[in-house]
Image (cartoon, grey):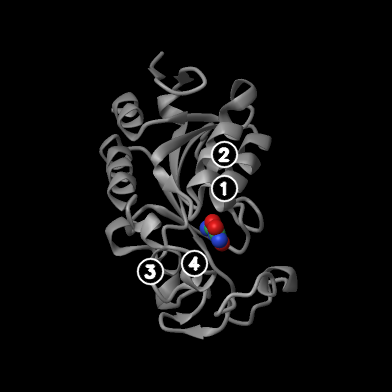
């Protein structure tokens, strides 16, 4: 069996049952004028990881393994947007408002699209998700079950919000989870560090953490 070098110990790869999940690499989180920026964040932290996420996606594509993309977005009538989400904080643009890239985090709008460099190719799965976790109110669980997936590699943004939430959901559903360290980022460096520490603590209580290079080498 191939083991991928990881923390807190090697990840026991099941090569025929692993998929990559790329969380929310959307213009709204990475470009000025989008939702991330409206919350007061420095979005340049997100664009810096694009080359590492791209390398990881290409590694999965060359290995012939599934790549799943998620997009955080809501229906135009906001029927899947609870007030607890729309009204939190004090952003200059709320979800559903008209902004420079169309309506913020609404399905089909320009700002909601995945960054061009990381765009899905034909045959890849795209999950539109209204929550932070990619399993909540989506077909993701059924899709993974149909394909016999048992292990998930995670990348994308933000580490402590949608990535960590989805990893925890996946862990509770029985998936072995491996986070690609350079292919995830937070608007807050200290939150990325803390999220990684809590994920791998207590003998990988939520999952493993590994480098993009070691993951690509392992699946190749
Ligand atoms: N995708 C995701 O993480 N959504 C967020 O709103 N993240 C923030 O850090 N705000």
Q: Is residue 175 visible?
A: no
Specify which label sits upstream in the sequence, 1 or 3.
3
Specify which label sits upstream in the sequence, 4 or 2.
4
Q: Which residue is mark 2?
A: 194
The residue that appears at 66% across and 58% down in the rendered structure is: 137
Relative depth, front residue between 56 and 150: 56
The 10 Å Cα crowd at callout 1, few under 14, some 14 to 19, many 20 or more, is many
Q: Which residue is mark 3?
A: 31
| Vertical arrangement, residue 136 with respect to residue 205, above or below | below
How much space separates mark 4 and mark 2, taking CA atoms?
20 Å
Ligand 1 within 8 Å of disc 4? The answer is yes
Specify which label sits upstream in the sequence, 4 or 3.
3
| Vertical arrangement, residue 103 with respect to residue 177, above or below | below
| Residue 155, horizontal then vertical, whole percent | 44, 44
Relative depth, front residue between 40 and 126: 40
Ligand 1 within 8 Å of disc 1? The answer is yes
Mark nearest the camera among 4 and 2 is 2
Q: Which residue is mark 1?
A: 160
Q: Quadrant of the C terminus?
A: top left
- State left or right for residue 32 relative to residue 187: left
């Amino acid at each position: 069996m191939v083991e991928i070098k990881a923390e807190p110990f090697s990840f026991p790869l099941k090569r025929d049952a692993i998929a990559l999940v790329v969380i929310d690499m959307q213009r709204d989180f990475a470009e000025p004028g989008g939702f991330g920026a409206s919350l007061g964040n420095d979005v340049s932290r997100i664009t810096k990881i694009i080359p590492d996420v791209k390398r990881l996606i290409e590694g999965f594509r060359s290995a012939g393994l599934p790549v799943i993309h998620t997009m955080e977005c809501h229906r135009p009538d906001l029927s899947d947007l609870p007030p607890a989400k729309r009204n939190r904080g004090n952003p200059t643009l709320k979800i559903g408002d008209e902004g420079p890239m169309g309506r913020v985090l609404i399905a089909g709008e320009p700002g909601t699209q995945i960054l061009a460099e990381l765009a899905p190719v034909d045959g890849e799965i795209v999950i539109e998700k209204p929550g932070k976790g990619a399993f909540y109110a989506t077909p993701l669980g059924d899709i993974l079950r149909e394909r016999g997936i048992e292990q998930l590699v995670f990348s994308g943004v933000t580490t402590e919000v949608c990535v960590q939430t989805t990893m925890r959901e996946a862990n509770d559903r029985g998936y072995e989870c491996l986070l690609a360290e350079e292919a995830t980022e937070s608007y807050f460096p200290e939150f990325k560090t803390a999220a990684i520490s809590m994920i791998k603590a207590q003998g990988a209580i939520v999952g493993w953490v590994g480098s993009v290079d070691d993951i690509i080498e392992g699946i190749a």
